[in-house]
Every structure is written in C-alpha cells, then in structure tokens.
Amino acid sequence: MRGIATQSLFCGVLLLAGNLRRLNAHREMVKAEGAPRSAERARRRRTSLSDFRPSG
C-alpha cells in the first residue's frame, strides 16, 4: 500500500478496530460486575483571580 490517503485510511480502520475492542471489553466488564462506580468530581477552588489582585 502506497500513498498518504491509503495509509490514513488504514490507520483509521485500525483506530476503529481498537475502539470497538475497548467498547466490547467495557460492556463485558459491566455485565460481569454490574455498573462501575462513577468517579467523583474534583472540588472547585474557593479562591478566584480577584483574590490575587494587588490592593491600591
């Protein structure tokens, strides 16, 4: 296979196959263990840029 277009298409197909494999593995994991616990969101900062402005 030669050419940039052909190589790009081949790379896209490989990425598609990898993503499908990941999705299938995730579905199997969810079926086997139940729904995984969702990640907690990071706490928001309590300071803002106005707290760092010089007074005057």
Image (cartoon, grey):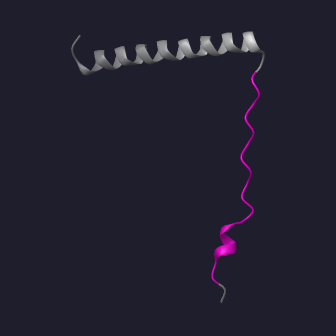
Query: Is residue 48 a member of the stretch shown in magenta?
Result: yes
Give, as a single range, the part of the protein colored magenta.
Answer: 36-54
Determine the residue positioned at 68% across, 14% down: 29
In the rendered image, the vertical position of residue 56 relative to residue 37, given as above or below: below
- Residue 30: % across, % down: 72, 15
- Residue 36: % across, % down: 75, 23
- Residue 31 falls in which quadrant of the image? top right
Can you name the residue that lies furthest to the front here? Answer: 33
In the rendered image, the vertical position of residue 6 relative to residue 54, given as above or below: above
Query: Is residue 52 a member of the stretch shown in magenta?
Result: yes
- Which quarter of the figure is the N terminus placed in? top left
Can you name the residue that lies furthest to the bottom here? Answer: 56
- Residue 45: % across, % down: 72, 58
Determine the residue positioned at 65% across, 69% down: 49
- Residue 27: % across, % down: 67, 12
Give whichever of 40, 16 is nearer the camera.
40
In the rendered image, the vertical position of residue 48 relative to residue 37, given as above or below: below
